[in-house]
Amino acid sequence: MKNAIILLSTCIIAMVAAPASAQTANAPSQRDRTEAFLAAKSRNQQARLAALGAEAGLGELNGIVRAVALRLPNPAFVDDPGQKRRLADAFLIDVALELATLGFNAGDVRATSGDGAALVSAAAARVRGTANLNQYSLLSDTFIIGRVTGVNTKDDRGDGYLSTVTFSVVRSFSKDLTANDVVELRRLSGESGTKRVGSSTEEPLALGDQVLLVGSRAHYRNSTRAGGKRKTAVELIPFYRVNGDTLSPSSPYQQPASLNDLVAN
Amino acid sequence: MRIKFTLALAALLSTVPAQAQVAFTPEPWAVTSKPVLINYSLPAGCDGPTTAAANTLNSVGARFQITGSGQYYTDVYINPQGDSDKANINIQDDYGLASSVPMRKIHYSEYVGRWVRADADIFVNGNMLYYFDPGEVQESTDFYCAATLPSGGLGSMTDYQTAMLHEMGHVVGFEHRTDSSTGPCVMAAYVARGTVKRALCDDEKRKFVAVYGAR
């Protein structure tokens, strides 16, 4: 009894003095987790397909993607061969969906180098989060150095984004954009009524800032159905600040880059 | 007279030591704790680093704590643009992300006479975990999910615990450091691949306690 009392007292002291502990309990099995991932992925893909519509020609894009020798997912923690096959299939569908969302149809893809292999590989790398700057440039339709001419943090247009940054194009790497063209960047962060949203990957931009924007107007149109023909884009990767030839990352996970390297390509 | 005063003030300010280089949003939580829930679909191996990141913040001793009741959820994928689940800090997969980043925090604040943080969630790019490609070692930014670091270093991989601690820092209100430091502080604006930062710097700890008070 004495021991029990002492133990109880110790527990009370620990509860008061120790910081709260975030512990895991009742952990689901990896097999169940993988099933949950696949189920959510399937729902997400169906929603994206519905947003794109039949005109996206996804069937033909799927065929092109499957003809390219992409490395398929093979996570060590998934040991069920059936789940691995379904992961691989989900991955290939994601690549085709990504190409369609970025505005590419089968003809566009075939017309690029290697009968589309470079473009498909770039889309696959974006899906996996491993694309480099050159691969993003292949996927982007809004690849510019822009100067910030306007910041509107209260611009709720009902498209899921709350703010707009307006750029004047200083230099364009996109065929249909030239110097002094205006491009709008839609961002999640901003205010609407009594609600304010902030995203850790959206660093504030100020008037006069010069950035390398790697964006996609097609992605905005195809995922929101609200873009129309306005030159409104979303970021494919967080922007780089331009300081002379140096490109400084604006997200903690970006890699530094040089404008000279970019121009050389 | 006003001009003289302004000049005097400017002279005074010029002698003040440089401000702390760790920034904090003026929208802290109005509560003292929030439970963290882990999305059912994220790999089991990443749970430990998530817990360790939360415990690292808790051990600083600020009044705001990240607790661990009700650990998993599976049936609801929170819409990042319309999140109504304000009870928890959800760790969740980032489907359909427009910006391809490994991890990010999205928070919601409400105006109740002042801006107060009402919700914050951490979005993980689950594709980097499940679409893992063992052949792309050189280019890979895949997550590394384990407490023990590999003897040969992380290479180009992203340490999940480092990233989770950084994003949890955003959850409690930290912004990126303004000193352009790449380290060793966890809230550095840029984290080189393969870098491990599983602890807060002293000025980050002080700021955290100063904002919320000590336990």
Image (cartoon, rainbow, N blue to C red):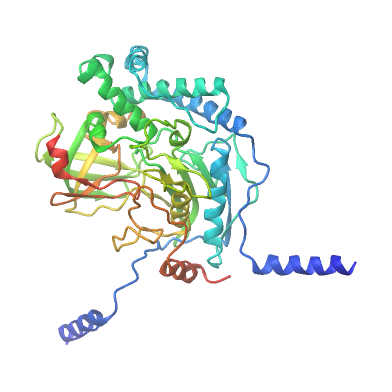
For the N terminus of chain A, give its image quadrant.
bottom right
For the C terminus of chain A, give its image quadrant.
top left
In the rendered image, the residue lying farthest to the front is B151
- The quarter of the picture where residue B200 lies is bottom left
Which residue occupies 34% across, 31% down? A125
Q: Nearer the viewer, residue A221 or B173?
A: B173
Indicate the position of residue B153 as horizontal and vertical percent values.
42, 48
Count of number-bearing discs:
0
- The quarter of the picture where residue A28 lies is top right
Indicate the position of residue B10 as horizontal and vertical percent values.
21, 80
Vertical relation: A62 (above or below) B112: above
Vertical relation: A232 (above or below) A155: above
Q: Nearer the viewer, residue B213 or B118?
A: B213
Q: On the rendered structure, is A178 left or right of B13? A: left
Indicate the position of residue A240 as horizontal and vertical percent values.
24, 47
In the rendered image, the residue lying farthest to the right is A1
